[in-house]
Amino acid sequence: MAEPLRNDRLLRALRRQPVDRPPVWLMRQAGRYLPEYRAVRERAGDFMTLCRTRELACEVTLQPVERFDLDAAILFSDILTVPDAMGLGLHFVEGEGPAFARPLRSAAEIRALPVPDPESELRYVLDAVRTIKRALAARVPLIGFAGSPWTLACYMLEGGGSREFVGARRLRFERPALLAQLLDTLTTAVARYLAAQAAAGADALMLFDTWGGLLDAEGFRRFSLAPLQRLTAELAAAAPGVPLIVFSKGAGTRLSELAATGCAGLGVDWSVSLTAARAAVADGVALQGNLDPTALLANPRAIRERVAAVLKDYGDAPGHVFNLGHGILPATPPEHVAVLVRAVREHADGVAG
């Protein structure tokens, strides 16, 4: 039997149970803003080697937890591991980001996509999960994650990163049934991948629907929300009791629909207040967020003020996971992250006092 977690604030908050203070962790908390991460990245030689080497992935996963004493660790990996395992050939171009050697360019390629076996094609990720769980020694929960089907489709059809992702959006209008077929395959693949992470030891899971906000209302319901609903149901059956957080960037007006998927928590970006988000979901799910990451580039006094504002915006009810409204920026000074973490704790102490 697994050793009970010594710090389970995150899991209790996701169940909307009382906690002594909101748990705090940060999206992209392991990354380029940390000098210790940059040193390991240089040792690895390239990003994918870092992801595929379990000991190195474990080391960088634990770095922010050790430095800031956060309430959760998040697996160091990338959302594009699933398309890579499907045969698209992921690599990273320095200064430009991810790219696929074999992006999807035809209906035949979409129809031929395999669903990878997590314990074979994605074994390196699951090995990293197991290694990190052992190293954490029940200190804090480990969060596993994946990209949403719609977000993965955007990259697979574009061939890499983009601001507009016109390939996926054009296919949505020209051949919606073909896009739906791609999303169906991806939903199966992501559900199996996340269930395997839970089986390997992840205590919570997160889905990044990074590009859901690019879709209009009808497109969002069909091509982003519907796959998320199916995913949530399949995970509930395959990994019962493991909470799922869904983060759909730019979808603040769709929170009530997202809450109805059955997820435990919703990530909220800074475009919507937490007060409004709580009203939208009728306090039915936990909320994670939503400090603007650029606030961490400001001076410590401004950071403390913004942290207090976020905490006040949510209020004293259970179910708040303090986080950023998107990933931490590479230019963020590490000492500013320490200010944020202290501010969350000090605010809670002040309220309790």
Image (spheres, rainbow, N blue to C red):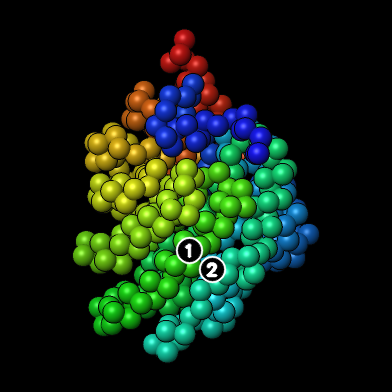
Q: Secondary structure at mark 2?
A: helix
Q: Split into 4 quadrants, where in the image is the N terminus?
A: top right
Q: Residue at x 53, y 39 (%)?
A: 25
Q: Which residue is mark 2?
A: 82
Residue depth check, mark 2 versus mark 1: number of the one nearer the observer:
1
User: Quick check: 191 left or right of 339?
Assistant: left
Q: Considering depth in this image, is 94 or 177 the residue closer to the camera?
A: 177
Q: What is the spatial separation of the Cα atoms under label 2 and label 1, in whole angstroms?
A: 7 Å
Q: Secondary structure at mark 1?
A: helix
User: Is residue 205 at least partly visible in the picture?
Assistant: yes
Q: Looking at the picture, does residue 101 appear above or below residue 18?
A: below
Q: Looking at the picture, does residue 66 appear above or below residue 222?
A: above
Q: Residue at x 50, y 62 (%)?
A: 192
Q: Considering depth in this image, is 276 or 110 the residue closer to the camera?
A: 110
Q: Considering depth in this image, is 316 or 185 the residue closer to the camera?
A: 185
User: Is residue 213 at least partly visible in the picture?
Assistant: no
Q: Position of residue 320 (x, y in %)?
A: 41, 33
State yes or no: discs 2 and 1 in contact (Cβ < 8 Å): yes
Q: Residue at x 47, y 39 (%)?
A: 323
Mark sitting on residue 214: none
- Amino acid, disc 2: Val
Q: Which residue is mark 1?
A: 190
